Image (spheres, rainbow, N blue to C red):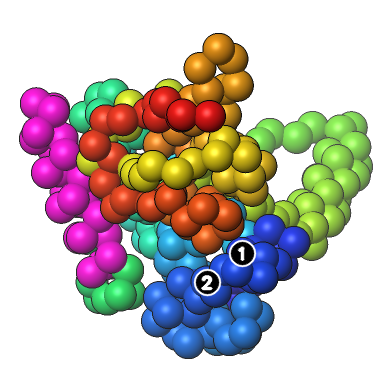
Amino acid sequence: MEKRRIDLSRCLVRDGKADCHRCEEICPQKAINGHVVDTAACDGCGLCSAVCPAAAIVAPEDYEGAMTKAQELAPQVLMCEKASEDSVHCLGFLTRRLLWALAAKRPLALDISHCEACRPAVFAHIEREVAACNDALAEAGKKEIALVHVKPAPPKPKKAKKVERRGFFQALFHSTAEGLQEIAEAQIEHSYCFDAAAFLKAQQAEPCALFHGLALQQGCTACGLCAVICPTQALALARGGKAALHVDPTACTGCDLCALHCPQGVLELLPQFAGQRDFLLDK
């Protein structure tokens, strides 16, 4: 059974002005209540990781590793463990921005052939994210994401090892040691906090309308609180000859802390990035 928890030191609940319940709202199993995960009810779909703006979901799966592995395939393809045993448990963690980061570089395929029957909520989520990403890809003149059905690879036949009588006990001892090591490794619980903003930054994803934007009205005093409060360092204040606020839309997760904490109330988070990264300030 997949075990997840919420790291409250990262969760927006730590901020008095934030009232985020995105993980609770999207969970199909109603396994999250009061920012606590009922591990018995959780089925490991990963939708909570997809919507968390603070990378606060601690999961037993390495989502970043799964996408990196997909990038090494030719063609580039993402699939769940039902399509391939070595793949990630479920594709519910995917978002339109993650898909864009992969598909904008080279053609991407998804195998979601098992999703509708396995997890309808995940299937509906991925359909929405793929559709949004495909619109952006078409706008950029890039190839849309292909939905495929990957045939499972046939199991590799195990070759019988020939062991001489003299080496029998040595081979037996070696086999036992390997078995004990596998048991010990299986008992180690691995956990990951998937930071989508960090992954997008590492991928050097080119921002488009799929990313968040920012609007700044007159009245900014260049206090810099927005840059200090931003958990992903998506905002930076330059205080040179002419003060300016710089926005990195790739790093923005839409947590809205900057707008909530703006003393002048002149910051506004936008659902789409319109191209403006720098705002000149009067102060």
What residue is at 64 percent from the left and 52 percent from the top?
A: 193
Q: Residues within 10 Å of mark 1 (few under 14, many from 20)?
A: many
Which range is magenta? 123-152
**Answer yes or no: do the residues labelled 1 and 2 have beta carbons within 8 Å?**
yes
Above/below status of 59 relative to 149: below
Above/below status of 112 relative to 3: above
- Residue 198 visible to an observer of this rendering: no
User: What is the number of the mark on residue 12?
Assistant: 1
Where is residue 211 drawn, in percent x and y?
A: 32, 43
Kindly identify the amino acid type of the residue bearing the numbered disc 1.
Leu
| Residue 144 highlighted magenta (yes or no) | yes
Where is residue 181 drawn, in percent x and y?
A: 83, 49
What residue is at 57 percent from the left and 54 percent from the top?
A: 263
Where is residue 1 drawn, in percent x and y?
A: 60, 75
Q: Which residue is mark 2?
A: 20
Q: Quadrant of residue 169?
A: top right
Looking at the rendered structure, the secondary structure element under dot 2 is loop
Kindly identify the amino acid type of the residue bearing the numbered disc 2.
Cys
Horizontal placement of 173 versus 125: left or right?
Answer: right
What residue is at 60 percent from the left and 69 percent from the top?
A: 17
Above/below status of 163 relative to 147: above
Where is residue 253 drawn, in percent x and y?
A: 46, 49
